[in-house]
Image: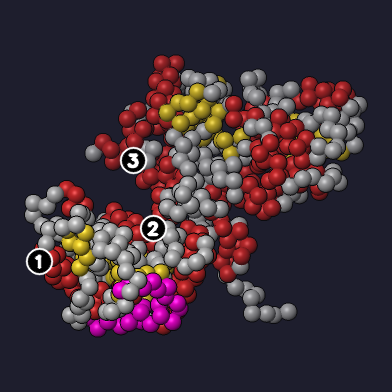
Amino acid sequence: MSHPYRGLPAERFWNSGVADAAPGLFDPVGEVSFTIERDDRIATLGSCFAQHVAASIRASGYRYLVTETAPEGSSAEKKESYGLFSARYGNVYTVAQAAQLLERAFDDVTFDDAAWQRDDRWYDAFRPTAEPGGFGSLGALEADRSVHLAAVRELFTTADVVVFTLGLTEGWRSRATDAVFPIAPGVVASRFDETEHEFINYDYPQVRADLDRFIARLREVNPGVRVILTVSPVPLSATFEKRNVWVSTTYSKAVLVAVAQDAARAHELVDYFPSFEVITSPLNAGTYYDDDLRSVRPIGVQHVMRLFGAHYLDPSTLTHATDDSLVAQYVEAGRVICDDELLDPNAK
Amino acid sequence: MNCQAPLWADSLQALVSDVDIACAFHVGVTVDLAGSVAAASAAGCDTLIVVNELVTEVADECARVGYAPETVVAVPGLYFAGFHPDLGYGFDGDERVRSPWGTDWVPRIAIGAYSLGLTLEQTLAMYSTPCFDALGYLDRWNPSSEALRVRFDETGFDFTQWMRATKRTGVFMHGLNHPRPLAVAALAEQVCRDRLGLKPRPAHTVEGVLYDALATSVIWPVHEPVAARLGVPAVEVVKINGRFIPWTEFVVGCYTDWSERGVSTDASVLPSLSQHELNTLVSFAGAMSL
């Protein structure tokens, strides 16, 4: 009997695609629509996991694009705040933040409530932890923001590849201006006032619209740019929804995965890369998470980036065909070791 | 009785404690096959569990002494190199090449480098991701797994079921032929259920009460490059009879000991080093000397 599943590749079936896959060799990536050359400029943005991606690309010897560098004479602490991402925008957790970033950089969109204060220090509401200890004055904040947005413009107009790690659906925004913040007001600076700020948990249509808006604007300023969308496997550290944080995490990641995959289908030169699936696969039985069950261990990051490298950077490393001569050798070695030890009076 | 026997005994007792297991012998890698058969006969065992390679010899010995167990179950030897591609047995002619700590297990790279006349410094530098990758050490899971599948097929046991149960526990071998308790228990579960008509508990439910008899012997490291490839924790120490010896110290000790004892450069290792592996070692040594 013929049926639609007959003859499909092994990866399409649970047993051969997951249950019987070798740990570490699990590869759910599938076909990619482009590859990355050594002279391509690669930019990253997104949530915390994107920092791992950035570090791995940098370590691979490929051209990791950084357009915002520490000024001469910066303190060591300040220097560390640069280079985590391609520009000093800090963690971009929600897709709404990313779309807002492009509009601020390219369309001169501004917000009245974008500077937060704590004691006598000033913090950029869109990247409140970017400047260690905050700025000494509002003027210093605005001057740095101007430099930052220029670097963002340079970044997105010159990047050949943008890797965007989608992190969260939960966020905070201004009721008055609709400005979207990466952290709830009051955590780093400013104060929380429910008449001014509101919690939002973006649903699929909202995230999809924001992502389409981000990609469209990016293409307008950089028509040839290739985009890799991936979803951070790092769970929420807290939820403002009245439910367990794991339920919120599942919702958030489900929306992001669905949006990213659908956007990749809808846009040319936009790929979905399954970081989330590699780390959270039942095949790993949770071993890719640290003891807090949230932080991703280096072995998990290495697995993700090994697949990233194999599919996008050097496809020649993809083949993992079983070496039949080795199989024969190991079969024989098992017997020989056994027979050999028969000769050894000290063998256990 | 070989070193896996205590694991078999413990597993069988744990899996089917309502059945009287007077004696559980795994007549496998042993010098005293006749003694084991005699002991089983004396204990009145009605079932023998025998590693497949020795079924004929055991049957012959049983016939010779007039011992007729009701059931003989041939089981696959549990050998798996995926976690420990550098583990081997060294030979210098008819002599064993052991570590100065007395282990039969020695590093394949070190034996190969020693036989090629490479320096200790060159040898140590080969314990790196690029060298492991070039040697094919990072891709040993599949061929090793397939080799084990062959042994399971030969004895009619379900390899897929065993591997699924076993691999989720992480590193399920202490070394090439030293399984951890669950690896034995998962096979023992099949033996009990499919060959002996018993109703064993699921192996994973008894994992916590099994005695890891082989943990007191030698536990081989899972080197960082292999661990990273397989997504398991790396361990860079050799545990020998309760001592934890850093890997570098172990290799230095082996190399120094072999030199002092005059082990010849004809020394070999099993599983043997392929020509590709030897060429790789020479190539890496050459690159280091440039």
Residue at (44% x, 66% y) in the render:
A240
For disc 3, the marked residue is B284
Viewer-proximal residue among B125 and A129: A129
Tell me how far mark 1 sits from mark 2, CA to CA.
Answer: 41 Å
Residue at (69% x, 53% y) in the render:
B161
Regarding residue B77, the answer to whether it shows in the image is no
What amino acid is found at the position of numbered circle 3 in the picture? Answer: Phe
Tell me how far mark 3 sits from mark 2, CA to CA.
Answer: 26 Å
Viewer-proximal residue among B66 and B70: B70
Regarding residue A246, the answer to whether it shows in the image is yes
Circle 3 — which element?
helix
* Relative height, residue B218 to residue A315 (above, below): above
For disc 2, the marked residue is A305
For disc 1, the marked residue is A139
Residue A257: percent from left, percent from top: 46, 71
* Residue A203: in magenta span: yes
Residue A285: percent from left, percent from top: 56, 53
